[in-house]
Image (cartoon, helix red, strand yellow):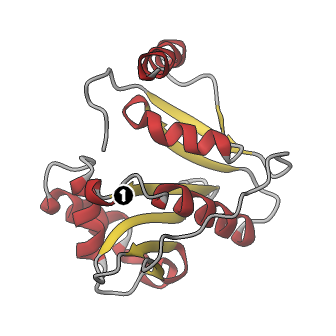
Amino acid sequence: MLDKRIPYIEFLMRRNPQSPVPLPERYLPEGYSLAFYTPDDEGAWCRIETAVGEFASETEAATYFQKNFAPFSDELRQRMMFIVDPEGEKVATCTAWRTEKQRPLLHWLAVKPEAQQRGLASYLAVKTTALLEELHPNQPIELHTQTWSHQAIGIYEKLGYELIPGTKDYEKGLAILKRVVEEAF
């Protein structure tokens, strides 16, 4: 879930191709599986992203999906991943996408609240990063995040992603992240 109790500040993170941080092995809990996008997965993506608070409604999520993903259905089959729970429900997603300038982009990582705290986000972050490294060798991988996703920022840092200075209110955002971490202990 997004932590909307704190101010929203955007960050850009990057993993360089020469990162000294190797991608760790991650495994899914028993009964869970990884699946790539199929044409009937738009609803699952919308439900997941709405459940974590990225969109106010599934209709709003569907509008985004139709504009930004639907035109690239063939590409999604090799780039958009889901985790399926033991009951067959898609509960998490992440996409190995690209920026407007065609740079590799880890995009829209989300895990439904009822499926969190099982290592699913970490698993998807590793798998998506590995896929991006395969599809775009020797290129830095970017991702956009925000203070509201402070738990995800910790996952990304463990995978060798670094916060990139220069975004608006960067220093203020770092102070918020520091405070959130201190309050957790």
Q: Position of residue 81 (x, y in %)?
A: 47, 73
Q: Is residue 122 above or below residue 20?
A: below
Q: Is residue 117 above or below residue 127?
A: above
* Number of residues whose C-alpha sits closer than 10 Å to that of mark 1, classed few (under 14), some (14–19) or many (20 or more): many
Q: Is residue 23 above or below residue 178?
A: below
Nearer to us in this view, 101 or 2: 2
Q: Secondary structure at mark 1?
A: strand
Residue at 26% in and 58% down = 114
Report if residue 90 is visible in the image: yes
| Amino acid type of the residue tagged 1 in the rendering | Val
Q: Position of residue 169 (x, y in %)?
A: 47, 16
Horizontal side of 17 relative to 32 (left or right) equals right
Write down the quadrant of residue 22 in the picture: bottom right
Report if residue 98 is visible in the image: no
Nearer to us in this view, 135 or 111: 111
Q: Name the residue carrying label 1.
A: 111
Q: Position of residue 18 (x, y in %)?
A: 86, 49
Q: How many marks?
A: 1
Horizontal side of 24 relative to 37 (left or right) equals right
Q: Position of residue 180 (x, y in %)?
A: 43, 20
Residue at 48% in and 16% down = 182
Write down the quadrant of residue 90 in the picture: bottom left
Q: Is residue 103 above or below residue 45?
A: above
Nearer to us in this view, 68 or 28: 28
